[in-house]
Every structure is written in C-alpha cells, then in structure tokens.
Amino acid sequence: MIGRRALGVACVAAALVATLGTFATARASVVVFGRVVGSGAAAVGAVGSGGAAAAAARRVAAAATAATTTATTGGRPSAIEGFDVYDGASAGRPATRTYVRRDGTTPRVGYHVTWCCENDVEHLATRVRGISRETLGLVFVSKGNRLGCRGLSASVLNHTWMCAETENAQGREVDAMAWFMRRQYDALPEIVVFTHDDRYYFPHMEAFIEGLRERDVAGGDVVGFVAARAKTMDELLARAPEKKSPSELTEDAFVSENVVHENLHAMYAYVNTFALLIGTFFEVKASASELEVQNETHELPGWRLSVKTLGDDIYWPVSANFAVTKTMIRGRTPQFWEAVIALATCDGKLTSHSFEYTAALEWAHTFERAWFPIAFNPNLRERSPEAYADCLLDPKSRCYEVLDWDRDVREIIRYDAERFENMTKYEYRQAAQTRGLRVENDPRDVVKSCGANTWSDHANHERGKLEI
C-alpha cells in the first residue's frame, strides 16, 4: 500500500511526460473507433510538446468526432442481404464487425441482446412477431459465436436492426452495452431494452412487448405509448433522497425482472470499485482519508466515499436486464461510455490506491449493481473527459489511483515503472469470482499495458464458452 507521505506532483508530471514523449517519436496511425484521425509524427508529435492536458484534449476531441461519424460512414454491402457492414476497433477491445440494416431507420425501441456461447436466439423472432422494425429493432452483440451474425436465421434477421461481432471476454454484457451506447450516441432509439440471449420472458418484459404489439398491429399510438413510458422512466430516475442514488426504480417502468434493494454497509464487497468509478468520473471530492483502509473500524476502502455519494441504500435491476431512455444514455459523454468499454475489456485497466487488481469480470459484477446508482444517476455530475482521457482512453495504458496526503486528494496516472515496480503485491478483497485473473504472485509482468495474458485480451476458444 502507498504510505501517507506526499506522492510528489513533480514525479507524476515527469512520468506522464516521459510516457507521452515516447508516443511523440512513434510513427503510427491514430485510429479511434475504426476511423483514422491522423498518421505518423504529425498525428502524435504534438503530444510531447503540449503536455498531458493537451494530449487529453486531443484524445477527447478525436473521440467526439468519431462518435458522430462512425454510425454513418464506412459501410459496404455485406454477405447478409439488406445489411451494410462496418469494420472498426473500439478503444481497448478487439476489432468489431457491425452489420446495420441498409435503410438506416432508427427504431423507436431498441432490443439489445448480449449473445454468446452458441446460445439459440430463435425464440426472439416469436417474441417480437407482428411488431414492425420501425417500432422495435433487435440489436445483437455476438461474443465469440462461431458464425456470428451470419448464424442468425431469416426469421430473426427480419426483425434485426443491427448485429455486431466481437471476441468473447469476461466483461460479460458490460462492453456490449457500452459499445452500443457509444456507437449510437447520436442516433439512439427513444428506449433501449438491455437483455441476454437466454433470459426467460418475464412478466414485465412481456407486458411491454405486448403493449407495443397491440398498438402496432391495430394502428394505435405507438409513438405516444413509447414517449409516455420514457417520460415516466426519466421522472422516476430523478427521485432520490437527498439527491443520492435513485430509489424509486420499479420493475414495470424499467422492464426488469426484479429490482434489488441493498444496504451499503461497511463490508459491502463493491464499495472499492464504486469509489473508483465515483472518484474517477464524477465531480465528487474524493479525499485520501475517505479512501484509506480503516482496519480499526472494519470497513473496506472506498466505503466512506460510496455512502457519502450514494446514500445508505442502493437499488439495482438483477442480471443487467432493464430498459433506459436515450436521455439517460446522453446524460453521460460519449467518452464516458468509451472508458467503460476499456474497463470491461482490459483486465487491471484501473487499479485502486490499495493495489486491488480489478479484472474485467469484476467490473461486470460491479456494473450490474452500479448502472443505476452511478452510471445513469442524474444526481452525479460527470467530470470533463479531459480529467481521465489521457490514461483511460488510451487503449494500451493501465491506470492507477494515487493518493496525495499533503493535498488530501486522489488522482489517476499511467503506469510508471519507477513508481510502481517495487510496490507491494496486489491484494484481492472483492467477493466475486475472478477466473480471468492471470496474476499469480508478482504483477509486474502484466501491469505495464493492456494486451497482456488476460481473458480480455484473448478469446475463450473452448466451444465459445464464457465461464461465469
């Protein structure tokens, strides 16, 4: 663990300049979400002279530009009739091939399915039968399936708006969901339902789908039905005691099979990762004293900050099955969703000050609980992406939370060999399983950059299975 001595602003600056200087001498193309934004020294040469803040600003600007163009450029006719195909890489994840229906119509409701493990999705054609594609469009993210989008039957494709292919990884549904929100940021449906390929047809989902079908078939007011539901969802999300985390989530309104109510007690397993999210992405003062391990009071690191920010209780839909509105998605910047992708596709992308190594699978368990209390919480004001872009939006960097006891603040910096190579070994305190963790005793061989020997960097080729 890092002691109470000052961590030295000059040392942080020197480490960043040294790292950025290396990039400045490289001759390579800069690619953001499949779009080349510059090449060679001209693309990156200014990084060394402009400093970390300028580099962050450029990274934010490039990503923002890509966000508005990815969905509408670069497509070509594909092997799937009626669809165009787009090839491109997202920050921190393998290349993605995306098939988009050629007519380009954004449906009023997007039905997003995380699809893996060769699971059968034919039942979805029956589930949405009779509903027009203008009203509801299926979105698949195929994770490691052998045939990918080409494995969809004609009956399923008839209702499909979009299908993406990527390698399987232990980020589970998180990277798939964040990828869609990032890609479609400027062309979102009014409502997006997030679900999995194997989820049963639970009552609140059935009621919502039947409401769409009845109006669609009878020529009723589908637009009004969807708008009214979205308005209710936005209003309920804003209800929170003392402007903490949302407390009036209902299964019916948010199309969830069950909403869990949990107390954020001092030993709650996810307060450390909650605190990492809060301190990194939001305008919440995260003091060093609120993040230190408090053994004498039997509390986990980050508990004080989590409770201060979110309140004593949180509510979250189980299994990441829920609906959101486009207003909720756009309550965060495109770069926020890009950073979430990076967390879920690079084991150890962001490590806490107590050196708790967080694998991609652990972020999946965290986000299942954090989507509504943190990610979509309208009471949390997001920091400027420049505060984290230089590290988190670099697809190869690994990022570390450090505490400065002189100023009683925390900050995020890149890996720095001089600073970290002799630090204590990683501790792991979280309760969830971490089968993707490939760190045995000493982390120094894998902490320097993404692309090491982790589940997130290599597909699980054993029959396409994801062990969770």
Image (cartoon, rainbow, N blue to C red):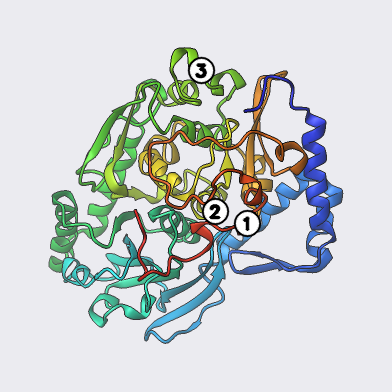
Local secondary structure at mark 3: loop
* Residue wearing tag 3: 294
Q: Neighbour class for label 1 at 10 Å: few (<14), some, many (≥20)?
A: many
Label 2 sits on residue = 346
Helix, strand or loop at label 2? It is loop
* 215 w.r.t. 387: above or below: below
Taking depth in this image into account, of 49 and 406 the one nearest to the observer is: 406
In this picture, residue 232 sits left or right of residue 146: left
Q: Position of residue 103 (x, y in %)?
A: 40, 77
Res. 457 image quadrant: bottom right
Instruction: Decide: is 126 above or below 426.
Output: below
Q: Are marks 2 and 3 in contact (CB under 8 Å)?
A: no
Q: Say the numbered circle drawn on residue 180.
A: none
| Percent coordinates x, y for residue 115 in the rendering | 33, 65
The amino acid type of the residue labelled 3 equals Gln
Name the residue that disc number 1 marks.
395
**Pointers 2 and 1 in contact (C-beta within 8 Å):** yes
Dot 2 or dot 1, earlier in sequence: 2
Q: Earlier in the sequence, mark 2 or mark 3?
A: 3
Q: Nearer the viewer, mark 2 or mark 3?
A: 3
How many numbered circles are shown? 3
Task: Give residue 376's quadrant in the image.
Answer: top left
As measured in the structure, the alpha-carbon distance from the residue carrying label 2 to the one carrying label 3 is 29 Å
Is there any visible trace of residue 381 in the rendered image?
no
Question: 311 or 263: nearer the eye?
Answer: 263
Circle 3 residues within 10 Å: few <14, some 14–19, many ≥20: some
Q: Secondary structure at mark 1?
A: loop
3 or 1: tag closer to the N-terminus: 3
Residue in the image at 45% along x and 61% along y: 187
- The answer to whether residue 151 of the structure is visible from this angle is yes
